[in-house]
Amino acid sequence: MVRVDGPVRPSVIYKDIPFTENVNGEATLTDMRYEAPETLDAAVGLLAEESGVARVFAGGTDVMVQIHLDLIEPDLIVDVKNIAEMREVVEEDGSWRIGAAVTGKELMDNAAFNAAWPGVMDGVRLIGSVQVRGRATVGGNLCNASPAADSVPPMIAADAVASVIGPNGRRDVSMADIVTGPGQTSLEDGEIVVSFRLPKRPANSGDAYLRFTPRSEMDIAVVGCGINLMLDDGGTCTAARVSLGAVAARPLLVDDAANALIGTKVGDDAMEALAAAASAACSPIDDKRGTIEYRTEVAGVLAQRTAVIALERAKS
């Protein structure tokens, strides 16, 4: 909120000029361009031409908050919601392509995708509130680069690949390699995440995501865990991927935890090895929401609980 000529009014971003508030609580005007291109080439061109601070705008649930808190002061906002490829959810020969500007609510309404990747949807359903999910996108949840982002570990577990475009062309990047630290990504200057590709779901496979939070809703993960596994006809695990969130500076792909499951029927011994490997991979921080020791212990327990759900889904 800002104060203009006495009464309180919402801050409004116009096409070129937003109201902001200076340190004295007074309304000021700051030059800022808003563009809504309809093609990827146009979006990449705008970002390449901008010499100042530019931000990509999809759902805006992070960017708008950061602007209002004076954490960022963009010279250019590039709204990508009018770019068709970034707004599609398409099944292609059993694999899925999700546009980076598709909202959480739109994914929740896609029954076929929900059936194919329930673990990914476990994470999407935990992004913010109902209202936030109506705007927030998986692309934004990734690129905001929070170590505790809920949709990222299950997407890593699903072996999702991001299609990225920029001034030097287009490239594919594993979802596990995008976030490099809190608020930091491996994206180069001017690059945009366009979409995500999830592989064809094999038979006898299942995925799941769980998080631990002090509250059941509207909270940030103390620990998050995504697991995707595949069984043979005899019930032996033949492939697995395990990802942890909120226990390191970036979401983790934990190969040792996956290897604890592969070649087993995911019984008690495998579960104990899974928990030990998950806890060993942790390098969390102490904060008001959890100590290092607490997060490390919870990671092992949560990995076991997530594996139980993934196993049940694979068998069904």
Image (spheres, helix red, strand yellow):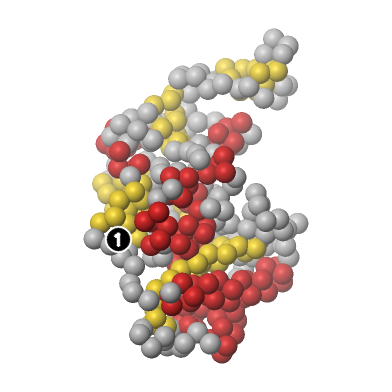
**In the image: residue 169, left or right of residue 120:** left
Q: Based on the displayed image, in which of its 4 quarters is residue 158 positioned?
A: bottom left
Q: Quadrant of the N terminus?
A: top right
Q: Residue at x 43, y 48 (%)?
A: 109
**Residue 120: image x %, image y %?**
46, 60
Q: Residue furthest left?
A: 93
**Residue 22: image x %, image y %?**
67, 23
Q: Amino acid at mark 1?
A: Ser
Q: How many marks?
A: 1
Residue that mark 1 sits on: 95
Q: Residue at x 50, y 53 (%)?
A: 124
**In the image: residue 85, left or right of residue 301:** left
Q: Relative to residue 231, is residue 245 depicted above or below? A: above
**Residue 148: image x %, image y %?**
58, 57
**In the image: residue 85, left or right of residue 265:** left
**Residue 308: image x %, image y %?**
54, 76
Q: Based on the displayed image, in which of its 4 quarters is residue 204 positioned?
A: bottom left
At numbered mark 1, what does the secondary structure look like: helix, strand or loop?
strand
Q: Residue furthest right?
A: 288
Residues packed near mark 1 inside 10 Å, few (<14), some (14 to 19) or many (20 plus): some
Q: Relative to residue 156, is residue 170 depicted above or below? A: above
Q: Residue at x 62, y 68 (%)?
A: 283
Q: Nearer the viewer, residue 143 or 45?
A: 143
Viewer can see residue 31: no
